Image (cartoon, rainbow, N blue to C red):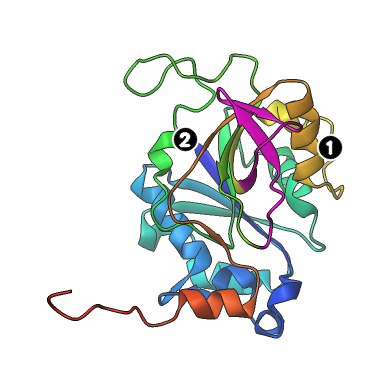
């Protein structure tokens, strides 16, 4: 399976930090956000990685190189002007970078240090890696990971029932910006055209073609300098005996 890390955003809410540094290179616990994703993907055996970029993208290429030092093979999809999430995927697909099989795509600015990417390997397959039936329906065009609603997004994005993603219904959960997609999902997007992923997902979800599950591990969408500072705050170690 191939992976695409979406790293073309400007990071407006992170200014002034992102004036001189692309958001995915901001560090949490001494490591750039995007490097957490690269290492977690490689740990799961997903080593073919595509990264799109726009704002200060040359700095991302300089930092990660071809990926060989991390056990990965990284290809880049530069965008003169950011094409949004779905537009960036469509562009990389048109350039032959993503292949014809389902691929995993994720944001380069989330912090989910314990997410196990081995679980995405059998998403959209008839069976899991042990040969057991997978809950994905053969019709599903996408498989999304959802998280509990963070304080900045209390309304959530999607409802989840019996591994089926719905645009309507309650309660709603927040899209973790990690998903597995069939390439044909992006057939309707002209390469080079700006297009967001959200409306596309809601459209397919309304047709009953999106599956998913809830992820309960640590997850942060690092959106503001205060969030970044909180993640980098010194860990409090309780005194011995407590």
Up the image or down, 224 lies above or below 116; here it is below
Q: Residue, x 14% and y 78% (percent of image)?
A: 240
Decide if residue 65 is in sight here: no
Q: Nearer the viewer, residue 175 or 191?
A: 175
Which structural element holds mark 1? Answer: loop
Q: Residue furthest front?
A: 242
Is residue 77 in the magenta section? no
Q: Residue furthest left?
A: 241
Is residue 155 in the magenta section? yes
Decide if residue 195 is in sight here: yes
Neighbour tally class for label 1: few under 14, some 14-19, many 20 plus, Cα within 10 Å: some
Q: Which residues are magenta?
A: 152-175
Residue under label 2, please give it.
Answer: 120
Q: Residue, x 38% and y 82% (percent of image)?
A: 234
Q: Which mark is residue 189?
A: 1
User: In the rendering, at what x and y percent does residue 89 appear?
Assistant: 70, 44
- Which comes before the other along the chain, label 1 or label 2? 2
Which structural element holds mark 2? Answer: helix
Report if the CB atoms under discs 1 and 2 are less than 8 Å apart: no
Q: Quadrant of residue 21?
A: bottom right
User: In the rendering, at what x and y percent does residue 228 appear?
Assistant: 55, 76
User: In the rendering, at what x and y percent does residue 236 appear?
Assistant: 32, 79
């Amino acid at each position: 399976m191939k992976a695409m890390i979406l790293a073309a955003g400007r990071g407006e809410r992170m200014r002034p930090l992102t004036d001189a540094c692309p958001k995915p290179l901001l560090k949490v616990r001494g490591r750039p956000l995007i490097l957490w994703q690269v290492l977690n993907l490689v740990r799961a055996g997903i080593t073919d990685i595509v990264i799109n970029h726009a704002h200060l993208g040359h700095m991302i290429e300089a930092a990660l190189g071809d990926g060989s030092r991390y056990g990965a093979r990284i290809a880049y999809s530069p965008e003169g002007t950011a094409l949004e999430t779905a537009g960036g995927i469509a562009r990389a697909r048109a350039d032959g970078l993503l292949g014809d099989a389902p691929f995993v795509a994720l944001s380069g600015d989330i912090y989910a240090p314990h997410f196990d990417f081995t679980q995405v390997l059998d998403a959209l397959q008839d069976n899991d890696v042990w040969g057991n039936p997978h809950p994905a329906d053969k019709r599903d065009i996408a498989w999304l990971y959802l998280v509990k609603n963070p304080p900045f997004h209390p309304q959530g994005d999607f409802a989840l029932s019996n591994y089926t993603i719905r645009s309507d219904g309650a309660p709603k959960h927040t899209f973790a910006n990690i998903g597995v997609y069939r390439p044909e999902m992006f057939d309707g997007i002209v390469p080079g055209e700006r297009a967001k992923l959200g409306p596309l997902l809601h459209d397919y979800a309304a047709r009953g073609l999106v599956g998913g599950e809830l992820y309960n591990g640590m997850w942060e969408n690092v959106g503001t300098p205060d969030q970044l500072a909180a993640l980098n705050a010194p860990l409090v170690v309780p005194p011995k005996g407590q």
